[in-house]
Image (spheres, helix red, strand yellow):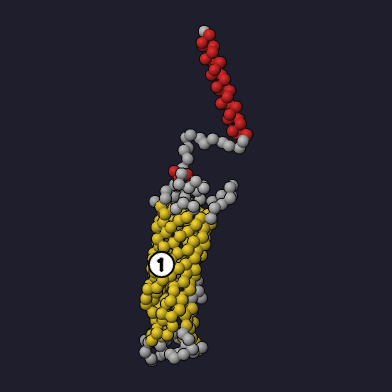
Amino acid sequence: MAARKTLIAGLFLMAGGASALAQNGYQDGYVQADPGYPPPAYAASYPEGPSSSSQSGLPNYAGLRGSLALSGSATTYTPAATPASLRSSFNTGGGGSIYIGTRLPLNLRAELEGLYRYQDARNIRANGAASGARGTNQTAGGMLNLLWDVPLPPGGDIGIQPFVGMGVGGVYNRLDVRDAGNTTGLMQRADWNLAYSFMAGLSMPLSDSSRINAMYRWMQVRDAGLNCAAPGTASARCLTTNLNSSTVDVGFEMDL
């Protein structure tokens, strides 16, 4: 009987101690995790805390982007020399890309992207005078992008994740501008060049494993060589320049 009384007293003391510890934990603002909901798998890989772009805990993802190429974003021209000076602005166009990415430590992400853009060439002027010439500009290639999810302050997670990034790669650019009769090539190029870009945008989760994003991207094709010709003359190299362009991209991606 004495042993039983001692055992019962010990159980009461243990229960009282556990209750006191739990109360102290709540008072300190710390709530223990429900053992029925284990910590997410990414907690060990991202000790600084996961961004809203990695709620599923899966390290890889893939997605699609649609691009609105902004008008007037790129301008090509030849110097005021023979052949005749030509100037062409690129109209609003479109395009898209497919990409696959992986998450890295420190809120970084690496992406391999294949992209394509199409824009009409308009407002073509020869020696300062308007002409009826028209053309197209197409760009396609591969880019390696490095993105950084900007850390949000504690308690500031509103479901939207800002990010910034840059990319570098090789693109094939084809420009074809012809006279009003679509017979004589006035400005042309078809070649591979180095390209780089800068990006900034926002990502919003649709579920733990999918999200949509929107971003602005500025891209430059380096040292693009252009062939030009006055109507009725042979085409020749007239200018080596950088082609700048900008787009607004909207994408959808899923974790793998």
Q: Quadrant of residue 42?
A: top left
The percent coordinates of residue 224 (x first, y second) are: 42, 77
The percent coordinates of residue 129 (x first, y second) are: 50, 89
Q: Is residue 91 visible?
A: no
The percent coordinates of residue 61 (x first, y second) are: 41, 54
Name the residue located 60 percent from the left edge and 30 percent from the top edge: 23
Residue identifier under label 1: 169
Name the residue located 56 percent from the left edge and 49 percent from the top edge: 157
Q: Is residue 61 above or below residue 240?
A: above
Report the residue that reaches farthest toward the right: 27
Name the residue located 47 percent from the left edge and 35 percent from the top edge: 36
Inspect the image, locate mark 1, and give the three-letter code of the amino acid beneath it: Gly
| Side of 94 where 2 appears, left or right | right
Dot 1 lies on which element?
strand
The percent coordinates of residue 225 (x first, y second) are: 41, 80
Name the residue located 43 percent from the left edge and 80 percent from the top edge: 240
Q: Is residue 196 above or below residue 127?
A: above
Report the residue that reaches farthest toward the top: 1
Q: Is residue 75 visible?
A: yes
Q: Is residue 113 above or below residue 27?
A: below
Q: Is residue 200 above or below residue 76?
A: above
Q: Nearer the viewer, residue 65 or 187?
A: 187
Q: Nearer the viewer, residue 43 or 184?
A: 43
